[in-house]
Amino acid sequence: MIQPRQLQLDEHGRLRHLLTLDGLSREHLIAILDTAESFMGVTRREVKKVPLLRGKTVVNLFFEASTRTRTTFELAAKRLSADVLSLSIEHSSTSKGETLLDTLRNLEAMQVDVFVVRHALSGAAHFVAQHCEPEVAVLNAGDGRHAHPTQALLDVFTIRRHKPSFGELRAVIVGDILHSRVARSQIHALNTLGCAEVRVVAPRTLLPVGVEQLGVKVYTDLVRGLRDADVVIMLRLQHERMQGALLPTEHEFYRCFGLTEERLALARPDALVMHPGPINRGVEISSAVADGSQSVILEQVTNGIAVRMAVMAMVVGAQAQASRGAH
Amino acid sequence: MIDPAHGVDRQADLYVADGRIVALGQAPSDFREELEIDASGKLVCPGLVDLCARLREPGAEHKADIASETRAAVSAGITTLCMPPDTDPAIDEPAVVELIRTRNAAAGSLCRIVTVGALTRGLEGTLLSEMATLREAGCVAVGNALRPIENTLVLRRALEYAATYDLTVFMTPRDPWLYQGGCVHEGAVATRLGLPGIPAAAETAALARDLALVEEVGVRAHFGRISTARGVELLRGAVASGLQVTADTAAHQLHLCEEAVAGFDSDCRVDPPLRTAADRAALCSAVREGTLSALCSDHQPHDADAKEQPFCATEPGISGLETLLPLTLALARRGELSLMVAIERLTAGPARVLGLDLGHLGIGAAADLCVVDVDSSYRLDGERMLSRGRNSPFKGATLQGRVEWTLLEGRVVHAPKP
């Protein structure tokens, strides 16, 4: 079976799907960031469009509810002049419903060019990429706990706009690492870009077994973990974690792992405060910090559109080159 | 000819009459030959005894059935299949034992099927099953398949009751809470892929509990599908303490580790999961020294839909009948086991666990045997598999060791194509 990292490249090494940042080369990462930079100007224009994907159909296949990610993908596709179809398929665990494979086949009959897939199960985007027609590009908008590549890309894109070089950075990711696809993708991106040190901070129950093998330094004490950090990324804590006997209360989590002004002072004075959103004020981050001068949380959202435009343009471009090559 | 039960490894002619082995080396004086099989250059060994194979009948005939699976079994040299009780309905009534016998006869009785009766009624884990009645009906052992018995007192009483009738209890050590939601070994691969993991403790916590009860009750117990190094250590300790305990593992556990899942390959989703290289090595040593006295197929054929989903939504299980022998022979070729030991773990070892006079080629024994071309290499073609379950991670791989002839009680049940 083909691993996601191999499946997303065509035989010429071009990016034809974006499924995971695990194993994606530094060259590819930089190319995406540079392309995103070139799209930053589009949002500031009068007519916020470029014709790159005119005539192409992009389908947002969201099996998991998400307003924010879906709307940014929609906007990205529209700014590239593509036709967009958004499907929110409620995936109830009690009702069987149509299989993922059947849903895919039915949609493909409508001649789609790009699938943007978000699903509750790890490996879902990989599954779609393996079963769809060869000319169709698949973008992973988040699959289970596995990966959320565009989120991590917009995060490192944001960091790059503020910090001179990754080689000197200490990046710290705090929160529910165990369940986080964002954290996993961020760890791969930061390491590939040569970050000096990537740290994760969480209580034992929220740390996956063997996480250090992903290339991180592990801390269970926020005070130690934040010392001299250049970038602090707070992850969202979901309410269900209390029910699963993973944490006692949100209150205790905030006491031990919440990012307050006092805690932030342990990091470098010019440290960036980031969060993939939506934020839980008073659970993982205080309002003062979320709205404070070091926070780039809103900037992350803006950058997300340019990054998604870049990724969409690149995979469609690779597919176009491939089909031209075939003639 | 290799007959591990008698330590035989020699070239000799074998004579079969009236379903039994009647002579070795020289024909008996009154022997009238009806069929001669030229086995020169081939391996002749006892027919394989498979301690765990799900034939999906009754209850899941959309996946497979007794006719298709017995045919697949004998084509792979397996002459005795042991079915766990988790059919639907469960094997907790003599009527179900009889049904299976009838279905096997209707399919031509290609393979001997023995059954493990339910330990608790409906496998629910609360009430005892009619174990004496099941034994009378022909069950060779009792067990609760993969369903947990969470109430320790119920488990203890079930073991005591089984011991009353001198029944072996088949157990698969699984802690349902630690297993919950997991689909791969809890380790580096689970973390990287973001898949919920099943820790080693899911096996060892249950195994330790079960061994404590087995020791106190003094029942004969067989632990199936061990997957961890720590589990092997616990078993070694139990055997050393004098407990009447045996255990097996699935053949695929000696060949695959958690890394096999790295591409989200659902054919590698199994229960217990594929674990680390260290676990694999420990299982291999245990098979070599005999702490694990049998290798089984853990055959679980699935329909295509069951495996064509995102990983966590698939059903676990490998279609293993057709790879049991080649995978085991591969261990011998790699030098991990001697050929004698490899064959023993597929024949005399499992037969002893079942308490049946099978798995050997002594004079007077049932003529269950197979003729194997150990040097013949072939590609496992999913489309040409005889099992209706094509869910095997070994599809497309090159296997060595092709069964040419299989005899069940002296009857030819598998022969080479003309």
Image: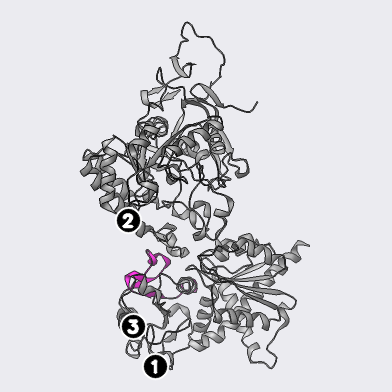
Disc number placed over residue B201 in the picture, else none: 2
Q: Quadrant of residue A237?
A: bottom left
Q: Residue at x 26, y 36 (%)?
A: B164
**What chain letter is assigned to the residue under label 3?**
A
Label 1 and label 2: CA atoms lie apart by 44 Å
Q: Is residue A66 left or right of residue B126?
A: right
Please tell me whether residue A244 is drawn above or below residue B405 in the rendered image: below
Which region is colored magenta? A190-219
User: In the rendered image of this protein, does residue A193 appear above or below residue B167?
Assistant: below
**Numbered disc in front, either 1 or 2:** 2
Please say if B147 is above or below B30: below
Can residue A62 be found in the magenta stretch? Answer: no
* Residue B221 appears anywhere in the view: yes
Please give the chain letter of the residue carrying mark 1: A
On whether disc 2 and disc 3 are found on a single subunit, the reply is no
Within 10 angstroms of label 2, few (less than 14), some, or many (20 or more) residues? Answer: some
Q: Which residue is mark 3?
A: A254
Residue A288 has which mark? 1
Q: Secondary structure at mark 1?
A: helix
Identify residue type, mark 2.
Ala
For label 1, the crowd category at 10 Å Cα-Cα, with few meaning under 14, some 14 to 19 and many 20 or more, is some
Q: Position of residue B152 (x, y in %)?
A: 27, 52
Q: Would residue A277 be found to the left or right of residue A42 on screen?
A: left
Q: Position of residue A16 (x, y in %)?
A: 64, 67
| Display coloring | one colour
Foreground of the two, B61 or B174 = B61
For the residues marked 2 and 3, what is the alpha-carbon distance in whole angstroms? 31 Å
